[in-house]
Image (cartoon, rainbow, N blue to C red):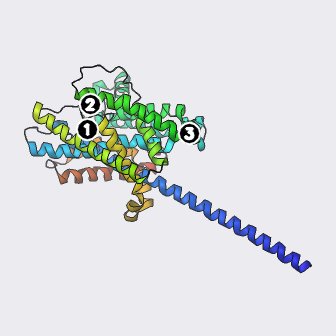
Amino acid sequence: MNFIKLNYYDYNESNKQEEINKLLIHEKKNKSNKNKILDYISFAKIIACYGVILLHLNNIWSVNLTKKNKWMIANIYETFFYYSVPFFVLCIGATLLNFNERYGLLEYNIKRFIKVFIPLIGWTVILYLYKVYILKNIRKENFDLSSFLNYFFMSKLYPIFSSLHTFLVTYMLIPLLVYVEKNNKIKIYTYYFFILLITQAAIPYILQLCGNKIIFIYKVNIGYLIYAFAGYIIHNQHFSNKIKIIIYILGILSFFIHLIGTQILYFKYKKIKRIHKGYLNLPSILYSCALFLFVKENSNFIFHILNRKYINNIGSLTLGPFFMHLTVSETIEKTIKFPKFFGFSLLLKSFIIFSICIFISSIIRKIPILKILVP
């Protein structure tokens, strides 16, 4: 009898241990899958950062418009890499619209302050001094507090810094949105997405096509939230193949509307018109969201080719290149007389500058005092 009880006890204990082991394996798999899902965010940040660099080197607005072939190549680059700034906001939505599941409001604000606001101040000071004393393209007599504050708040140092102000506004608005009940988030955010898509993008875009004969008064400066909502939806929602095909078709059509529409208007008016341009324009939104979904859906293929750990390490350093790429480019042009880069060579130059910036960022992160610049 005791023998039977002992065996029965051992059997139960063995079963319990087996269940615990299964739960641990399941939890480990979930964690691994979650990490794999988030890895594509690192890749998205990398290609967004590279795209920003190429757009500024390409600078379609300064290309000699009399040389049509060169301008057409510049237009293709401009249109293809137009996803760059939207991708950063899509990543914000994908990773932060559920921050309340990981930490509280105070910790959220502290993290945003450390990761965005302090680097913005630090890089503005460093690059301002570098341009005054090394590049010498800012006059020394203008070096005072009021001048610096103008450079900081008005993004006079580099216009790209105004994008950081947009990101900061988005960060500040996110806490108003995260406390929607988890089960309703996709539904509510989809509703917000389409309201913003219609009022902030579709109607203004259609009115532009009609010649702006009607003034639309409901265009407000919260439009970038559309990318935050889209990022969350794309990151958390599993779309059917039919929906994915529709999104991809809309994205491809938007790409060609932007590309060909800009080109037609250029040939007509002999100057670049902004009707199809702007990150809050309908073609940009549909194209950027479709491409972001494509990156997410094909992340397994991407990481079959690329090293996951390496991509995550680079992805964590992208704030550095975002700030310093124009200064690095100016320094190279001042010290080394390169021929004019165009076509494939422009892709190469962008990659070289991106690599230099990543290398500098990795060094900065190892220096105790300076590592706050690349959190």
Residue drawn at 83 percent across, 72 percent down: 9
**Which dot marks residue 138?**
2
Q: Residue at x 83, y 77 (%)?
A: 7
Dot placed on the residue nearer the N-terminal end, 1 or 3: 1
The label nearer to you, 1 versus 3, is: 3
**Residue 212 in which image quadrant:** top left
Residue 135 - label: 1
Q: For residue 228, which quarter of the picture?
A: top left
Task: Give the mark, 3 or 2, whose residue is nearer the N terminus.
Answer: 2
The amino acid pointed to by label 2 is: Ile
Residue marked by disc 3: 184
User: Callout 3: few (<14), some (14-19), or many (20+) C-alpha neighbours within 10 Å?
Assistant: few
Nearer the observer, disc 3 or disc 2? 3
In terms of secondary structure, where does tag 2 sit?
A: loop
Identified by mark 1, the residue type is: Leu
Q: Relative to 292, say whether 264 is above or below.
A: above
Q: In the rendered image of this protein, does residue 7 appear above or below residue 277?
A: below
- Residue 173 lies, in percent from the top left, at 49, 31
Residue 95 image offset from top left, x and y in percent: 49, 45
Q: Residue furthest front?
A: 242
Q: CA distance from mark 1 to mark 3?
A: 53 Å
Do the residues under discs 1 and 2 have CB atoms within 8 angstroms?
A: yes
Quadrant position of the N terminus in the picture? bottom right
Vertical relation: 284 (above or below) 308:
above
Q: Is residue 87 left or right of residue 180?
A: left
Position of residue 213 measured from the top left corner of the image (x, y, whole percent): 23, 20
For residue 307, side relative to residue 181 (left or right)? left
Q: CA distance from mark 1 to mark 2?
A: 8 Å
